[in-house]
Image (tube, rainbow, N blue to C red):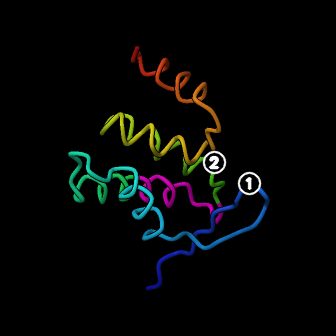
Amino acid sequence: MEAPRLYVVKKDGRREQYNREKILAGLRHACEKRPVADAQLEEVVAGLERELFSRGENEVPTTMVGEKLMEALKRLDKVAYIRFASVYRSFDDVGHFEAELAKLGTP
C-alpha cells in the first residue's frame, strides 16, 4: 500500500510535495552545536507527520508546518527555536530578535 501524498502550499501559492528530509535538515541546522539528539528531532518530525496525516487532507500550508515546528523547538531548546524562527519569520533587524526573546521571558 502506498503512503498518501501530502503537499505543502507555500506562501506564494506554489505547491511542493512534503519532504521529510528537508524538514529534518532545517531542524538539524537550527540545532547545530546544541544539546539536542537526532532522535529528538526524528520524534518532532514523526509527531508533525502524525498530526498532518491524521487531518486527512492532501495539502497543508507551510505556515502551519512552520508554526508546529517552532512550538516543538520552543519546548526542546530555546536557542534552536530562536535560530529557526529567525529564518522562518525572516527577522531583518535586532528588534525582531529582542521581541521574540521577550516572548520567551528572556531579558
Q: Nearer the viewer, residue 30 or 40?
A: 30
| Residue 21 drawn above or below residue 71 | below
Q: Secondary structure at mark 1?
A: loop
Instruction: Answer left or right for 14 relative to 20.
Output: right
The amino acid sitting under disc 2 is: Thr
Q: Secondary structure at mark 2?
A: helix
Image disc number at residue 30: none
30 lies above or below 18 = above
Q: Nearer the viewer, residue 35 or 63?
A: 35
* Residue 88 position within the rendered picture, expressed as x and y whole percent measured from the top left: 57, 47
Amino acid at the residue labelled 1:
Lys
How many marks are shown on the rendered structure? 2
Residue count near mark 1 (Cα–Cα under 10 Å), binned few <14, some 14–19, many ≥20: few
The residue located at (43%, 71%) in the rendering is 21
Q: Which residue is mark 1?
A: 11
Q: Which residues are magenta?
A: 48-59
Q: Dot 2 corresponds to which residue?
A: 63
61 vs 4: above or below: above
CA gap between label 1 and label 2 equals 7 Å
Residue 57 drawn in magenta:
yes
